[in-house]
Image (cartoon, rainbow, N blue to C red):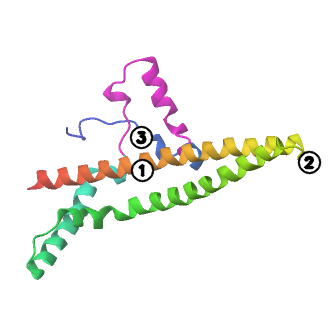
Amino acid sequence: MDSSKRKSKPNPKLKANPVSKILFWWMKEFLWTGYKRDLEQSDLYEPLKIDLSEKLGDDLERVWEEEQSRALQKGKSPSLLRAIFVTFWKQYIFSGILTFLVSMGSRVAQPLLLGKVIEYFTPNSTMAIEEAYMYGAGMILNVYLMVIMDHQYNLSAAAVGMRIRIACCSLIYRK
């Protein structure tokens, strides 16, 4: 498709604040339109600059050429997997580390909070009901945080996978 023939709406993610990005609130207009009627091509947004095939293809092509010259010097076959890894590893690592840290914190906090809620129901407990409610609310917020982080990681991983596919297709069509 020739992108010069059509002009889409600007991507709302560009102007979204961090909370809107975390909660996917920046997509509400698009989702509401899809709820009311079938989506059409004119409803789609411009892709983000990081997702453009020209840039992704250029980045992968540069690394692929380096991989080919490195393999030639060592007398081995070049590895497309290595070129993909070198091109996209930073995007995977950042979201993976953040998700790991939040997940570990949440998984440690959940049984501790549950233990405090159970402690309220033990005989001779001096814990006030308000304190038990706070621990219960902490459990709910903790689960909510885990769900949000899981969705953010899944979106990030899918986006990187999409970028890898776009970059590889761009290289194939350049041949």
Q: Residue at x 42, y 24 (%)?
A: 34
The residue to which callout 1 is attached is 156
Residue 36 locus on image (x, y percent)? 46, 18
Mark nearer the viewer, 2 or 1: 2
The residue to which callout 3 is attached is 10
Question: Tag 3's secondary structure?
Answer: loop
Task: Report the span colored magenta.
Answer: 21-47
Pointer 1 local density, CA inside 10 Å: few below 14, some 14–19, many at least 20: some
In the displayed structure, 79 sits above or below 99; it is: below
Question: Tag 1's secondary structure?
Answer: helix
Circles 2 and 3 in contact, beta carbons < 8 Å: no
The residue to which callout 2 is attached is 126
Q: Which numbered disc, 2 or 1, marks the residue that appears first in the sequence?
A: 2
Query: Farthest residue toward the bottom?
Result: 73
Residue type at tag 2? Thr
Give the camera-side residue of 28 and 101: 101
Query: The C terminus lies in which quarter of the figure?
Result: bottom left
Q: Which numbered disc, 2 or 3, marks the residue that appears first in the sequence?
A: 3
Q: CA distance from mark 3 to mark 1?
A: 20 Å
Question: Tag 2's secondary structure?
Answer: loop
